[in-house]
Amino acid sequence: MSLKIIFILLVGLAGGIAVGAGFVAFIAVLGIIPRIMQLTKSMKMLIYYKWATILGVITGTWIGLQEVQFSLHWFLLVFLGLFQGVFVGMLAASLYEALDVLPLIFKRVGLQDRLLYLLMAIVLGKVFGSLFHWLYYINL
Amino acid sequence: MNISVYFRLHHRVQVKQDQTVVLKDIAIIDAPETLKKDLEKVQVHKVTKQDHNIVILDGIKVIQKVRGKVGNCDIQLIGPQQTIIEVITKKKKMSKPLFLIAWLLLFIGSAFTIMNFHEDTSMQTVHQKLFYLLTGIEDSKPLSIQIPYSIGLGIGMILFFNHVFKKRINEEPSPLEVEMFNYQQNLDHYMIINESEESIKRIDES
């Protein structure tokens, strides 16, 4: 019996380590944290950002697996949504950058001087697509 | 006394069709005043139709051209070992429809990918669950998360790319600009190796 429990614990731990390492690798490859530090000029705070990510992951995991329940006002969730959006936006932007699609498109079409407008096309496309999804698409 | 002549090739220059390229166009020269005047006018390349739009001019070739003019000088080449000459056939005009198509491609493309991403990651369910967890109210459409989320998405991308239309958030180049630079650099490197005959020696089977 106790052997079974130890085995289960080991499986859980191993799974957690693998997923955690994968998450960190993903974040590291995309370079979101360096970008945030660059924008806020807070390179010295790296260690805190690291812990913020780790604690965030742990909190998210815990809340997701437990049936805890708070009674917050819905308005607080506006900030939550906004922060999630900024994070996912940076994720998407860095993915674009990592995949090298944009330099190729811009060069092939010969539109290097209009870079900004094309960037805005992507950004507005994301916002529009997202709003369309939540406000209309899911009702279908 | 031995006179030294230094020149540093530009990495990349643009010339017009049928232009005669002189040393001044492709390099910064440092030499005694009298010699410099002559050197600047040394013809290093004549652009012809056969050149298409890229010519790689190797440093050695330039030295060979210069050698005759300066005689017994010590020629020093510093910086890049070759220059990429880009022949501009006609002023590239940006066509409005093409721009519009590219704009729409990116707009529609990114709109669809974000929708697919939401479906893929079951974000709807996560938002619903999160809304219930935090407020205790069941809501199948937790818009108070989702609308700010959508706006935040745009803000995040702008932050990452460091641009809001014409305005820059700070002086540093954005990752995208660095990426474009790297891309160009790689292209140049490829052309230097592959397009100039000097860089590759093949065994001729004859």
Image: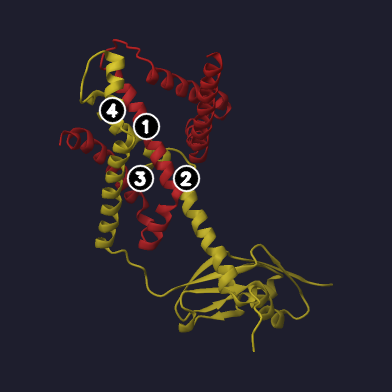
Relative to A99, residue A55 above or below: above
Q: How far apart are marks 4 and 3 (CA)?
A: 38 Å
Which mark is on residue B125? 4
Say whether marks 4 and 3 touch (CB < 8 Å).
no
Q: Residue furthest left?
A: A140
What is the display colour for chain A? red
Amino acid type assigned to the residue bearing label 3 in the image = Lys
Q: How far apart are marks 1 and 2 (CA)?
A: 17 Å
- Crowd tier of the residue under label 1, counting other residues whose Cα lies within 10 Å: few below 14, some 14–19, many 20 or above: many
Residue B107 x, y percent position in the rendering: 27, 48
Q: Does residue A33 show up? A: yes
Q: Distance between the residues labelled 2 and 4?
A: 33 Å
Residue shown at 32%/27% (left/top)? A82
Q: Distance between the residues labelled 3 and 1?
A: 21 Å
Q: Which of marks 3 and 1 is in front?
A: 1
Say whether marks 3 and 1 touch (CB < 8 Å).
no
Disc 3 element = loop
Residue shown at 35%/49% (left/top)? A116
What is the display colour for chain B? yellow
- Crowd tier of the residue under label 3, counting other residues whose Cα lies within 10 Å: few below 14, some 14–19, many 20 or above: few
Q: Disc 1 designates what residue?
A: A86
Relative to A5, residue A131 above or below: below
Disc 4 element = helix
In front here: B202 or B4? Answer: B202
The chain that hosts pointer 4 is: B
The chain that hosts pointer 3 is: B
Q: Disc 3 designates what residue?
A: B166
Relative to B182, residue B6 above or below: below
